[in-house]
Image (cartoon, rainbow, N blue to C red):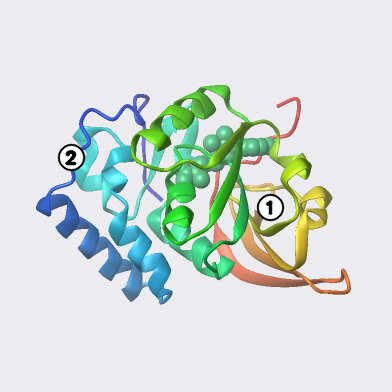
Amino acid sequence: MVIIALDYICNMQKLEDNFKHQGMRRKLVNTLKEKGITDEAVLNAIDTLPRHYFLDDTFLKQAYSNMAFQIGAGQTISHPYTVAFQSSLLEVKKGDKILEIGTGCGYQTAILMIMGAKMFSIERQRYLYDKTKVFLPKIGYKPKLFYGDGYIGKEAFAPFDSIIVTCGAPFIPEALIKQLKPGGKLVIPVGDGAVQEMKRLIKNEDGTVLEESYGEFSFVPMLQEKE
Ligand code: SAH
C-alpha cells in the first residue's frame, strides 16, 4: 500500500471538474471493475464524485489511482477499491439510513449519499470533523455529521439499516449491533494489527447475528477513549 504524506489535503484550491478529470475517473471505474466490483450503483457513484476535490491539486494524478492518502491528523482517505468494496457489501437501497464511523474527509459519506442513502457519520478527530462539516455542504452534500466516539454509535438516531466502520476495530462494538434494524448490516474491518479482516454482520429478525468474512484490508486504527 502506498501512502503519500501530505498535511494540507482537504484544502480544496479550486473546484473544477473537467473532461480530463472525468476521463481519469472513467479509468478508475474500469480498474475497479477489473478488480471485481460489479455493483452498478457503486461504480456510478465513483464515476460521479470528483475524488480530486478531496485532495490537493498537486496530487491530481494520484487522486484517481488506487491509493490511500493522508488527510491530516495522521489519518488517511481509504483506497477507492476499499470504498467500493465496503459500499458493495452494504447493498444500499435508496432511502437507507446509514451510520458511518470515521468520517475523515467525507469521500465515503458522499459516495453513499450519491447511492441514495441518508447519511449519519461520526468522527473523533476535531480537526477533520470541523473541516468536513464545512467542505461537504460546499460541494452539495449535507449529511448529519457528529464529533464523537464511534464505539458508542448514535443511539439518538438509531435504528439504522446499515452501519459502516471505516477504521480498523480491535473488536466488534456491541452498541453498533444494538443500533441495527432487524435485517440490518454492519460492515467492519476487525483486527488490532496492521491488517484487519473485513466482516459483514447481518442481524436476523430474531436478534441473532450472522457473521461473514471478506478477506484482509488495511485501515488506520479505530481509537478508543484515551488514545
Ligand atoms: N471514511 C473516510 C476514511 C477515513 S480514515 C474517508 O472516506 O476518507 C478513518 C477515520 O476514522 C479517521 O478519520 C479517524 O480519525 C476516524 N476514527 C478513528 N477512531 C474513531 C472512533 N473511535 N470514532 C470515530 N471515528 C474514528
Observer able to see residue 42: yes
* Label 2 element class: loop
Q: Residue at x 27, y 43 (%)?
A: 52
**Which percent across, then down, holds residue 129?**
53, 29
Tell me residue 220's x, y (percent). 56, 42
Disc count in the image? 2
Q: Is mark 1 within 8 Å of ligand 1?
A: no
Q: Position of residue 169 (x, y in %)?
A: 69, 48
**SS at mark 1 in the image:** loop
* Pointers 2 and 1 in contact (C-beta within 8 Å): no
Q: Is residue 153 visible?
A: no
Q: Is residue 135 left or right of residue 25?
A: right
Q: Foreground: 171 or 148?
A: 148
Residue pointed to by mark 1: 191
The residue under label 1 is which amino acid type? Gly
* Residue type beneath disc 2: Glu
How far across and down, in percent of the image, does residue 207 sit?
87, 68
Q: Residue at x 32, y 75 (%)?
A: 34
Q: CA distance from mark 2 to mark 1?
A: 39 Å
Which residue is at 18% across, 40% downward? 16
- Seen as rendered, the residue at the extreme front is 95
Residue at numbered disc 2: 16
